[in-house]
Structures are given as structure tokens and as C-alpha cells.
Image (spheres, rainbow, N blue to C red):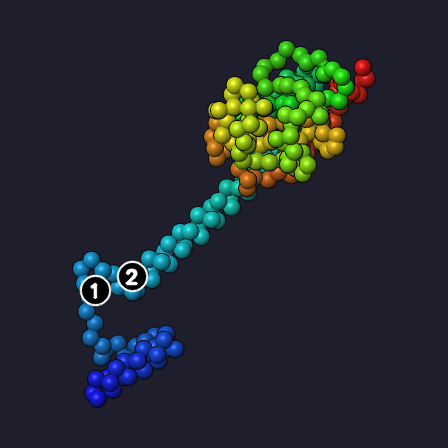
């Protein structure tokens, strides 16, 4: 009988404390009558466990805030680079100079390891390209090999992150295995003038959280600069 009464009393106390978690804060004198012992060696108290959980939560929130600040800073830097780059490209005096500037300035302004430019044409034969570095190619707009980019071309929006092995191989050829993150953007809307890819050997250099508005603007500008030199605009 005594055991049942004691058990019932314990349950009542526990229920009361659960309903009144601030009891000891409001009645600090009640602590004086309690017999408290230190936690056994190798264990931690509930208060310590709670403190550690709060510290872990605060650290996680700090990391998230730090990531947001870093992303904002990167986006501001991206805006400035795109603005300066567009001004420089507008000063190009010829097709050769424009293509050369696109390849060199993009690599410099974005601290990229690789830049690839794939131009689309709609006539029977492609335009004559100047003798430049690797990663500049021309494909017919209906070429079957472009089907691997159908998703990107349909959305007409830049993609930052990772490309498939097939996509990298088409754009970067022998350098494909070294590319681990890419900012890939279509040049204008339908009909699209081509694809531009800015790549890094660092898998974290270009990521999905990066702003793409300025990349879209860059693609539109480059498309308009290339248009006067495109093969199908001049006819056969």
C-alpha cells in the first residue's frame, strides 16, 4: 500500500513539474530542501545536455548566417564583374577580337580555369572562326549532340553547379575530366545563339546558390554582340 502511495506521489510531482517547468525559478527556496548529487563519472547532467544542445543550435545558426553573408558578398562581386566585362566586350572592333576577348576576359574576371563557347548556326556551313585557343566550337542548331542540353535550352536560364560527363565532354573535350563545377548559360532566347560555360577545377567554385540574374544579362549581351557576325545573318 505504501509503495503504491509513494509511486502515485512521484507521478503527481512529475506531472506538476512538467506542467510548471519554471517552478524552481519562481520558488528558489525550494532548492534548499533538495538533496542533489553530482552526476556519475562518465555521464552529463540534464542542464549540461541542454546547454550543449543550445550551443550546437547557436553554432548552426551562426554557420547559416555566415553562409548567407558569403553568398551576398559573392553576388555583389559577380554584379561588378559582369558590368565591367560587358563594357569591355562592347569595345571589340572585330569578330576575332570579340571571341578572343570573351575567352580571355571571362577566365580572368571569374577566376575560371576553363571557358568554353559553343556557337549554333542554321545555314548549311558554319562561319569561319579565327585561330584561337581550345574550347570554341560550332554546331548546327539541330545537331543531335545538343539534346543533352535540352533541359537548359528549354528553360533559357543559366545553371550553376555540375554538368554531366557527356555535357562536359561536348564543351571542354580533353579538359572535361578536370572540370568539377560550371556556370553554363544560353546565349539569348530562341533562336539561341549558343552556349557559354565558365568552369573551375574546384567543385565548390560555382554552385546552385549563386545569383544567375547577372549571368542571364551577360548571355543576352554576348548574344547581341555575336549576332552581326553570325553566319545565318549574312546568308550563304
Residue furthest top as drawn:
131
Residue found 31% across the figure and 61% down from its top:
49
Residue found 63% across the figure and 31% down from its top:
149
Residue 26 drawn at (x, y percent): 35, 78
- Quadrant the C terminus occupies: top right
Structural crowding at the residue carrying mark 1, measured as other residues with C-alpha within 10 Å and reported as few (<14), some (14–19) or many (≥20): few
* Circle number at residue 48: 2
Label 1, label 2: how many angstroms apart (C-alpha)?
Answer: 10 Å
Q: Name the residue under label 1.
A: 39
Residue furthest bottom as drawn:
1
The kind of secondary structure element at disc 1 is loop
Structural crowding at the residue carrying mark 2, measured as other residues with C-alpha within 10 Å and reported as few (<14), some (14–19) or many (≥20): few
Q: Report the front residue among 31 and 10.
A: 10
User: Seen in the image, is 23 located left or right of residue 227?
Assistant: left
- Quadrant the N terminus occupies: bottom left
User: Seen in the image, is 6 located left or right of residue 99?
Assistant: left
The kind of secondary structure element at disc 2 is helix
Residue 216 drawn at (x, y percent): 66, 35
Residue found 61% across the figure and 21% down from its top:
103
Amino acid at each position: 500500500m505504501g509503495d503504491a502511495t509513494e509511486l502515485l506521489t512521484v507521478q503527481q510531482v512529475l506531472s506538476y513539474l512538467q506542467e510548471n517547468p519554471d517552478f524552481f525559478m519562481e520558488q528558489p527556496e525550494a532548492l534548499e530542501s533538495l538533496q542533489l548529487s553530482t552526476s556519475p563519472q562518465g555521464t552529463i547532467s540534464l542542464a549540461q545536455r541542454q546547454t550543449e544542445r543550445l550551443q550546437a543550435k547557436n553554432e548552426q545558426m551562426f554557420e547559416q548566417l555566415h553562409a548567407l553573408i558569403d553568398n551576398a558578398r559573392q553576388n555583389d562581386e559577380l554584379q561588378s564583374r559582369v558590368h565591367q566585362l560587358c563594357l569591355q566586350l562592347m569595345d571589340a572592333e572585330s569578330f576575332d577580337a570579340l571571341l578572343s576577348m570573351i575567352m580571355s576576359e571571362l577566365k580572368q574576371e571569374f577566376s575560371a580555369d576553363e571557358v568554353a563557347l559553343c556557337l549554333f548556326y542554321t545555314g548549311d556551313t558554319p562561319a569561319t572562326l579565327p585561330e584561337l585557343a581550345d574550347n570554341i566550337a560550332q554546331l548546327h542548331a539541330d545537331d543531335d549532340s545538343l539534346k543533352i542540353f535540352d533541359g537548359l535550352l528549354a528553360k533559357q536560364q543559366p545553371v550553376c553547379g555540375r554538368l554531366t560527363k557527356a555535357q562536359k565532354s561536348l564543351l571542354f573535350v580533353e579538359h572535361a575530366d578536370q572540370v568539377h563545377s560550371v556556370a553554363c548559360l544560353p546565349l539569348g532566347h530562341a533562336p539561341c545563339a549558343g552556349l557559354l560555360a565558365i568552369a573551375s577545377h574546384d567543385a565548390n567554385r560555382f554552385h546552385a546558390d549563386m545569383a544567375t540574374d547577372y549571368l542571364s544579362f551577360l548571355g543576352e549581351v554576348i548574344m547581341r554582340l555575336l549576332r552581326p557576325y553570325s553566319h545565318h545573318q549574312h546568308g550563304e
